[in-house]
Amino acid sequence: MTWVDGAILAVLAISAVIAYFRGLVHEVLGVGAWIGAFAAALLGQPRLAPLAAQYIQPLWLADAVTFGGLFLVVLVVLKLVIAWFARAVQNSALGGLDRALGLVFGIARGAFLIVLVYTVAGPFLPGTERWPAPVRDARSLPYVATGAAMLVAALPADYRPRLPETATRPAPGMDDLLRPPARNRI
């Protein structure tokens, strides 16, 4: 196990712990709040921009302030409502289930973030032969590469980024994962 594996495990653990304490309801509705705030800002900005343009110049700045202000106001209001609702769920009989499902959601979110970073960084990475040894030897690399390939396959063909060519070694089995790395063997 290399420091890259440790970093990936840390991201998964931090995401899982945060989601556990917040609960599934809070996490899912939190994502919905960001989407709702963006949609409200997108739909409300054309209606409020002329009003802001009377006080703010240049016009592009008025548009940006209107969009940003509307986004923040809607996000704060939705987050307050979500906090109240999530607290009610956690204090109910469903609190334990909410936290357990939040833990699962947190692991999935952490894995998605890791795969997303690998996918976005893919076009900018050099060939795998130039990667540092801890990255090349990471036991989690085949899983991340497989997840990135699945994510890219779900995109339209015109928008698929280039992924780095990883070594064609198979994903490690349980024995491989539990065996310590062979360092300093002569």
Image (tube, helix red, strand yellow):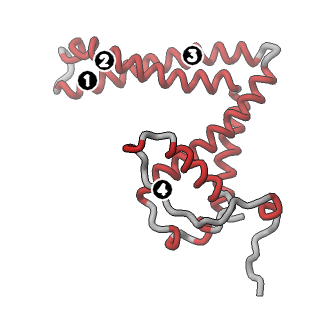
Q: Residues within 10 Å of mark 3 (few under 14, many from 20)?
A: few
Residue tagged 1: 63
List the single residue furthest toward the bottom.
Answer: 186
**Residue 80 - label:** 3
Distance of label 2 from label 3 (alpha carbons): 22 Å
Q: Give the Cα distance between marks 4 and 2.
A: 37 Å
User: Could you say which disc has been placed on residue 163 in the image?
Assistant: 4
- Name the residue furthest front: 157
Find the distance from the CA under tag 3 to the CA under tag 4. Answer: 40 Å
Q: Secondary structure at mark 2?
A: helix
Mark 2 or mark 1, earlier in chain = 2
Tell me: 38 left or right of 107. Answer: left
Image coordinates of residue 17 in percent, x first then y, are 71, 38
Looking at numbered disc 2 in the image, what kind of residue is underneath it? Gln
In the image, residue 27 above or below residue 157: above
- Residue plotted at (61% across, 25% down): 28
| CA distance separating discs 1 and 4 | 37 Å
User: Quarter of the image holding residue 18?
Assistant: top right
- Cβ–Cβ under 8 Å for marks 2 and 3: no
Q: Amino acid at mark 3?
A: Leu
The three-letter amino acid code for the residue at tag 4 is Leu
What is the x, y in percent for residue 83? 62, 18
- The kind of secondary structure element at disc 1 is helix
Image location (x, y in percent) of residue 160: 43, 47
Q: Quadrant of the N terminus?
A: bottom right
Q: Is residue 131 left or right of residue 156?
A: right
List the residue tagged with mark 2.
Answer: 45
